[in-house]
Amino acid sequence: MYGATAGEPKTFWENLENAYYGFCDYLEDKGIGIYGWFVNPLENNGIPSLNAAIVIMLALLIGVTGVAMRGSTASLGVQDNKDTIANEPPELPVESPTADSDGGTGESQELPPLPPDSTPPAQSETPLLGADDGSQPPPLPPG
């Protein structure tokens, strides 16, 4: 049972055919003789014009995509310098900083010395557990 009756839902292909021939009727009404130069010559020779239109549209889509993608190619190149020693690490370029605390000259500056009256912070006299100074942790209370 190929066709749908009045109460049955139409298949996708039947809906597509109706839309296609509706579009062809629209073009014919606007003065573009699509039936005379495309639809009738194909169908008179046994070639469904909808199938031909789909093939042509796909070919155009693939062609346009191919042309659009032609300009955007990516390439990867590998260069081998045979003058280097196999175990020698490669030299990497070092970028100089653009702005440092010294105004961007790239020169290192030493920190100013501490004032004579300042002393380093005192260390705690309580030994830390697991310290490497050889001390033992305090014994646990009996319990």
Image (cartoon, helix red, strand yellow):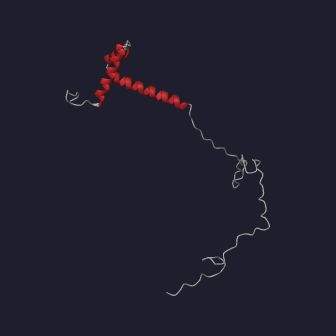
Number of labels in the image equals: 0
In the depicted view, which residue is nearer to us: 22 or 34? 22
Task: Residue at 30% x, 24% y: name it.
Answer: 18
In the depicted view, which residue is nearer to us: 126 or 70? 126
Vertical comparison of 5 with 42: above or below = below
99 lies left or right of 12: right
Task: Residue at 33% x, 15% y: name it.
Answer: 40
Is residue 48 among what the camera can see? no
140 lies left or right of 29: right
Vertical comparison of 128 with 113: above or below = below
Q: Quadrant of residue 124?
A: bottom right
Task: Residue at 56% x, 31% y: name it.
Answer: 71
Q: Quadrant of residue 6?
A: top left
In the depicted view, which residue is nearer to us: 62 or 84? 62
Q: Quadrant of residue 10?
A: top left
Q: Position of residue 74 (x, y in %)?
A: 58, 37
In the depicted view, which residue is nearer to us: 86 or 2? 2
Vertical comparison of 133 with 10: above or below = below
97 lies left or right of 5: right
Residue positioned most to the front: 117
Give the position of the N terminus as an image quadrant. Answer: top left
Vertical comparison of 102 with 59: above or below = below
Q: Position of residue 52 (x, y in %)?
A: 37, 23
Is residue 51 among what the camera can see? yes
